[in-house]
């Protein structure tokens, strides 16, 4: 999907250094998800037919909901066999499925259908499973782990195995250890994994089978209708010719294109393949250009209306509407992009960038001709605001995008093209489904053993019960976890293990989950394995480490703002909680903090700032983010001192 987008847009940018094929290779190399096979012949036709059937079934169930557990079982019974056909057993595997792949696919189909065939008895036997129940359950678990290994690598399956071993051997731990428990036998562990709604068939898989697949179908329909090309073209045409326009263009393109790709790495590569030549001609050094690309790519996952998959899980865990989660994310998104745009303005002056003439259509004619691509995005939010479920809202938006595609003959969704788009929606959800099913195993162990509360007490004990220290430990833990496993899995694991440590100290559930969500996403731009930054450096040819640090500078507000809504009472306003006045006050003060932070990291106010001014701005930013009267006054005072000192120094330099 992303390769098509970048290829289709390349003509607008003029000289590109990265074609569609190499973009696909970069995504395959740096994305947390492994590349799917390039199927052909009858196998490709069969996969398309099955995937199309599942997409249509999911769309139908948005209006005719089925019983929860059978629906999840049907979903897994389709996606698990598809995964073994569509994904290689290793990076060196062939694009043609082998005998082992077909055997695993058949075994997955049989094992997943077994609970459905004997569903009523299967559920009743949860406390006394038969040998066949345990055997079928064990096969499902092993196949889920293998599917997860094929799609996102071996680290998450290894985590799952470690948690399963903890459930089995925990009874052998010393009695006085906090994390010790009585121990469970194989039958009890397997039951918790597959004979209820806490394991494989838990909330994470339910989110994949409802929210996420509907949004991947929507994204695929948008992509096939030409929206990806339009989003890049309109970004190129949006800003007037100025030295900061190239950086702004990349940021806007990343935000818009992220609604189609849903992946930080994929968005970075898709935008970079088109925009890096523009940044280079504007005078950006490779590392700074790569930082802009990576920050723009990751921003799409942090931004409404199509946040990352973890945002849907937040809605399910909190039992709130997805629209509520979008509201939580609105102010942090504004602050995130404010930080990027301020950093771009500063870098334009620091590096002496220049305006670039781009061969792109004019903005208003382009919007008048193809602006209908924006309509479905607005429809999702409007329908949810009017009380429609997110399922129906995204289905209506998908139908609208498909209908409007006929306004462009080149991208009209004819029956054949529509079938390919719907099938692409299902195949696009396979890695997420495998990840969610595997994450459910960890949730099951945490629920079975009470590990969440035990880990919470350990974290709170290590921090001495000090909320600031606890939040710092939690942030580091989530970042480290995110270096090893995909964003969705790291959020699920952190939510059930680390989240209680924050709520035990008085942090609300919304604040705790959003804190974890941001740090799970930010792991993609965090050293030492910042995937988006590595992908950007591969495009620009810059030093990978310096690109990571440049990305960190652009995304720094996103690292600090979550502490504001966890540590301070006024921080609730950043999640759109409270009165309008409280929300506006929190937003305004935080925006001032982001501006001070940009000055500190970029080294400029009205001109080049000295070390003293930069230190004062950094301290002012931290104080402002406390969002309490005295720290805010102190921060504002320090910022005034920094600006005054800067003006005095500039005047002296002008005299001399």
Image (cartoon, rainbow, N blue to C red):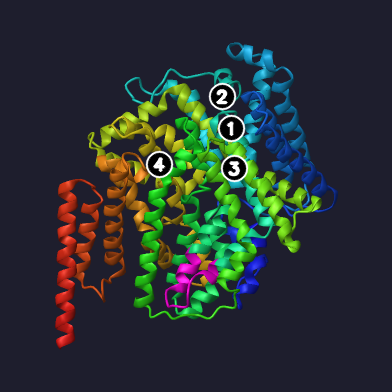
Q: Which residue is mark 2?
A: 197
- Confirm or deny contact between disc 1 and disc 2 (CB under 8 A): yes
Q: Which mark is residue 206?
A: 1
Whether residue 244 is visible here, answered yes or no, is yes
Look at the numbered disc 3 and give the secondary structure of its residue.
helix
Q: Which residues are magenta?
A: 235-251
Residue shown at the point (29%, 39%) measured from the top left: 470
Give the mark, 4 or 3, whose residue is nearer the N terminus.
3
Residue 146: image location, x then y, percent: 64, 39
Q: Which residue is mark 4?
A: 514
Q: CA distance from mark 2 to mark 4?
A: 24 Å
Q: Residues within 10 Å of mark 1 (few under 14, many from 20)?
A: many
Q: Earlier in the sequence, mark 2 or mark 4?
A: 2
In the rendered structure, which disc, 1 or 2, sits on the residue that comes first in sequence? 2
**Mark carried by residue 639:** none
Q: Residue at x 64, y 23 (%)?
A: 67
- Residue occupying the point 67% across, 24% down: 70
Is residue 141 placed above or below 8 in the rendered structure? above
**Residue located farthest toward the bottom when viewing the structure as drawn:** 656
Q: Which residue is mark 3?
A: 432
């Amino acid at each position: 999907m992303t390769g098509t987008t970048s290829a289709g847009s390349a003509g607008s940018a003029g000289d590109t250094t990265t074609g569609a094929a190499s973009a696909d290779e970069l995504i395959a190399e740096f994305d947390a998800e492994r590349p799917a096979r390039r199927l052909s012949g009858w196998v490709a036709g069969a996969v398309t037919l099955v995937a199309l059937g599942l997409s249509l079934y999911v769309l139908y169930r948005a209006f005719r909901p089925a019983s929860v557990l059978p629906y999840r079982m049907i979903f897994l019974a389709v996606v698990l066999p598809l995964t073994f056909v569509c994904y290689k057993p290793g990076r060196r595997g062939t694009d043609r499925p082998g005998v082992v792949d077909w055997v695993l696919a058949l075994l997955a189909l049989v094992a997943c259908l077994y609970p459905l065939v004997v569903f009523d008895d299967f559920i009743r036997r949860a406390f006394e499973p038969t040998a066949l129940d345990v055997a079928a359950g064990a096969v499902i678990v092993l196949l889920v782990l293998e599917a997860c290994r094929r799609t996102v690598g071996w680290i998450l399956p290894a985590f799952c195995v470690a948690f399963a071993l903890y459930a089995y051997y925990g009874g052998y731990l010393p009695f006085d250890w906090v994390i010790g428990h009585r121990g469970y036998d194989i039958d009890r562990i397997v039951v918790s994994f597959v004979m209820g709604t806490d394991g494989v068939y838990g909330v994470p898989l339910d989110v994949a089978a409802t929210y996420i697949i509907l949004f991947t179908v929507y994204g695929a329909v948008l992509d096939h209708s030409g929206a990806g090309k339009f989003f890049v073209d309109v970004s190129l045409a949006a800003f007037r010719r100025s030295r900061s326009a190239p950086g702004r263009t990349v940021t806007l393109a990343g935000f818009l294109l992220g609604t189609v790709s849903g992946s930080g790495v994929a968005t970075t590569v898709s935008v970079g393949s088109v925009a890096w030549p523009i940044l280079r001609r504007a005078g950006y050094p490779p590392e700074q250009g790569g930082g802009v690309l990576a920050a723009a790519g990751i921003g799409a996952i942090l931004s409404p209306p199509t946040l990352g998959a973890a945002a849907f899980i937040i809605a399910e865990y909190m039992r709130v509407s997805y629209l509520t989660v979008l509201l939580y994310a609105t102010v942090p998104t504004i602050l995130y992009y404010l930080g990027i745009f301020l950093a771009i303005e500063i870098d334009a002056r620091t590096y002496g960038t220049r305006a670039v003439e781009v061969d792109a259509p004019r903005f208003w004619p382009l919007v008048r001709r193809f602006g209908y691509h924006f309509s479905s995005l607005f429809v999702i939010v409007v329908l949810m605001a009017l009380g429609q479920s997110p399922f129906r809202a995204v289905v209506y938006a998908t139908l609208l995008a498909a209908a409007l595609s006929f306004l462009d003959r080149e991208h009209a969704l004819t029956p054949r093209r529509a079938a390919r788009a719907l099938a692409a929606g299902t195949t696009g959800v396979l890695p997420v489904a495998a990840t969610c099913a595997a994450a459910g195993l960890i949730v099951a162990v945490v629920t079975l053993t009470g590990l969440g509360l035990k880990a919470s007490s350990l974290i709170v004990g290590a921090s001495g019960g000090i909320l600031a220290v606890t939040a710092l430990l939690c942030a580091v833990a989530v970042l480290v976890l995110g270096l090893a496993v995909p964003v969705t899995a790291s959020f699920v694991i952190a939510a059930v293990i680390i989240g209680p440590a924050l709520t035990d100290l008085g942090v609300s559930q919304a604040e705790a989950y959003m804190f974890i969500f941001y740090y799970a996403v930010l792991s993609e731009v965090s050293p030492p394995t910042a995937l988006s930054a590595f992908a950007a450096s591969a495009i620009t040819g810059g030093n990978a480490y310096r690109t990571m640090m440049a990305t960190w500078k652009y995304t720094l507000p996103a690292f600090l703002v979550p502490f504001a809504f966890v540590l301070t009472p006024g921080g609730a306003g950043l999640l759109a909680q409270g009165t309008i006045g409280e929300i506006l006050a929190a937003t305004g003060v935080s925006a001032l903090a982001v501006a001070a932070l940009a000055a500190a990291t970029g080294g400029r106010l009205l001109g080049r700032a000295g070390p003293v001014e930069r230190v004062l701005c950094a301290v002012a930013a931290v104080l402002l983010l406390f969002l309490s009267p005295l720290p805010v006054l102190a921060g504002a005072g320090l910022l005034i001192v920094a600006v005054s000192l800067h003006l005095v120094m500039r005047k002296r330099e002008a005299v001399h």
